[in-house]
Image: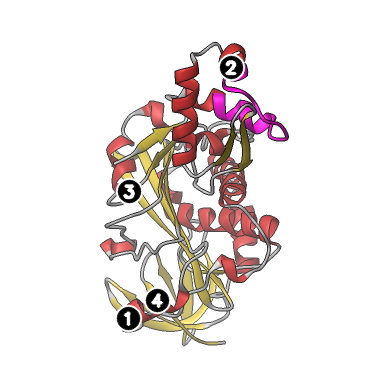
Amino acid sequence: MLNYNSFDNPGLVKVLTFLQTHNTEYLSGQDLSDVLRISRVAVWKHIKKIQELGYTVESKQKLGYKLTANSEALLPWEITSGLKTEKIGQQAYYFDSLDSTQNQALKMSADISNNGAIIIAAKQTGGRGRSGRKWISPKGGIFLSIILHPKFDISITTLFPIASALALSIALEKTYKISPELKWPNDLTIKGKKIAGMLVDVSLESNKIENLVLGVGINFDVDVKQIEKELKDTPNFYGVSTLSEHKKKVKPIQLIQSFLTELEEIYKLLDSKQTEKIISEWTKRSSTIGKNVELNTIDGEIKGKAIRIDHDGALVISKNKTSNRIIAGDIIHLSK
């Protein structure tokens, strides 16, 4: 298993940054060696590794090296470079393969020094969704988890996945100029088909939040037909969409940096108890509110009209002048 983080590869990052900032010219191995004060052999080894990571580096005899294309991989130094957050995403860990980013993040979550860290996997072999369900992790998807040690009250923990879905929606609006719908509790859809989903694991200690881990899966450039074939018999399956259907050329790194920035802004609102703004912005984008819905909960099946979400993210549904508050459950949209 290959893994990299944003702080353990200074030599490689130095060579890469120099190539990126001088990408209109060829740089000789000697030039790189002199400027960066490392041996020619070290330069060559770093360039070999840079190429293995998906960057295109041309090599010409007597001229040297020239970077002609960046990697599409969500490498940690690319995430942190130019990221305008105070905490979230400023430490990044990249794995070429993991059972699940959520499991890896949970192992690291107790350590306060990992507050704000992001864990990314190019491939997941055992991704999981809400309620322990298997999460399909197709080629071309983005899979990540974020470790947080929040200050906000335990009573609004259930609002966090809703707030996080809102942050991703805003990031998609800004980068892709599209308007995803928000499906309660934590899915994003385009024309009713799923584009992304969230999962939150919370660790509690004497009625306080010790830490929480947010898991995110985004259909960035996936084979929709293949996923639909695999999932068509799954209960409550309502279709899949992919961002690559939108012809706008957005790099994965741009989307993730935008999401981390928006997530930190929303996280600050939660910390300062400004939940009304989150609820009103989520409601504006919601495909659930106003619909007749059916919910499978631990207390059985409930039907009614979704009328609003409460201060803690609970869905309020009304039937025969009776209101029910639902904190968690599987939802089916029946009609308007």
Amino acid under label 3? Ser
Q: Residue at x 71, y 62 (%)?
A: 177
Q: Name the spot of residue 89 as percent of width and height, x first.
A: 51, 37
- Of labels 4 and 2, earlier in sequence is 2
Q: Mark 1 near mark 4, Cβ–Cβ under 8 Å?
A: no
Question: Principal SS element in the magenta part?
Answer: helix
Disc 3 from disc 4: Cα separation: 21 Å
**For the residue labelled by badge 4, is the local secondary structure a helix, a strand or a loop?**
helix
- Of labels 1 and 4, earlier in sequence is 4
- Disc 4: which residue: 226
Residue 144 at least partly seen = yes
Q: Mark 1 near mark 3, Cβ–Cβ under 8 Å?
A: no
- Residues drawn in magenta: 15-32
Disc 2 from disc 3: Cα separation: 36 Å
Q: Which mark is residue 235?
A: 1
- Closer to us: 289 or 46: 46
Name the mark nearer the viewer: 4 or 2. 2
Asked whether, in this view, residue 253 is left or right of residue 249, the answer is left
- Disc 3: which residue: 97
Disc 1 from disc 3: Cα separation: 28 Å
Amino acid under label 2? Gln
Q: Residue at x 27, y 51 (%)?
A: 99
Asked whether, in this view, residue 279 is left or right of residue 324, the answer is right
